[in-house]
Amino acid sequence: GAGVSQSPSNKVTEKGKDVELRCDPISGHTALYWYRQSLGQGLEFLIYFQGNSAPDKSGLPSDRFSAERTGGSVSTLTIQRTQQEDSAVYLCASSLTGSVNEKLFFGSGTQLSVL
Amino acid sequence: AQTVTQSQPEMSVQEAETVTLSCTYDTSENNYYLFWYKQPPSRQMILVIRQEAYKQQNATENRFSVNFQKAAKSFSLKISDSQLGDTAMYFCAFTYQLIWGAGTKLIIKP
């Protein structure tokens, strides 16, 4: 596609339910990042995929969070047993090679609200 | 630990004025990269400018420039001739873009 696509744009769920957030990166981009942006705060790194390498999961806040990237393209971030503190905007970004100085292309995010 | 600090939660200037947003960081690395991103109400982050630490020359992109002071670990963004479309959140980020500041909300008034 022309840009990074995220769905849904908004998600309201009840505490304790599982949610799946989807990211479709720019075609050909080998690197994919997930971030969490809480209200009034900066971006918090969650997980990073680079090609066929093992993902960098160092930013995942708990074992309720997981992500996968199928076929080196689409990625799904799953949050199990959601808590109210999980409410945030979840942003996905991709880049061509994942080089340290590379520009990231961001999606418009998923606003998650846990009631 | 590597950190990025943006000390100005919100700034407001008149259209056509010049505004400077501050960013300081802490690292023990010698070679790294710094970035400024803009986030308009659409939520989609857009790269404004980037700086390589080993380059002494400050980066410039049209109306946007940086003042990079490596010894002071300071990386400020200057916006000249500000426009209404510059209204957004501005974030400073470090190296692999895994570490971000809390952001500065910039409002350009007509």
Image (cartoon, coloured by chain):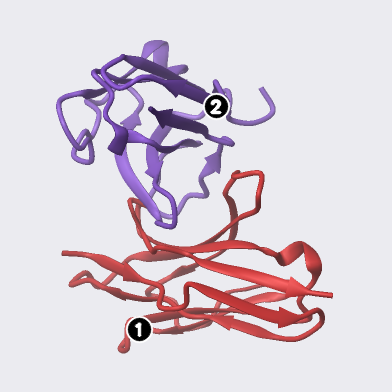
- Residues A73 and B8: in front is B8
Q: Chain of mark 1?
A: B
Q: Which chain is purple?
A: A
Query: Circle 1 is placed at which residue position?
Result: B70
Give the residue at the far top of this rendering: A71
Name which residue type carries label 1. Lys
| Residue A114 position in % (x across, y down) | 38, 28
Q: Which mark is residue A10?
A: 2
Above or below, B79 against B86 in this view is below
How far across and how far down the image is residue B72, in percent?
A: 32, 88
Spatial separation of the CA atoms under disc 1 and disc 2:
41 Å
On the rendered image, what quadrant is the N terminus of chain A found in?
top right
Please give the letter of the chain rendered in red.
Answer: B
Residue B10: image tag: none
Mark 2 is on which residue type? Answer: Asn
Q: Splitting the image into 4 quarters, where does residue B42 fall? A: top right
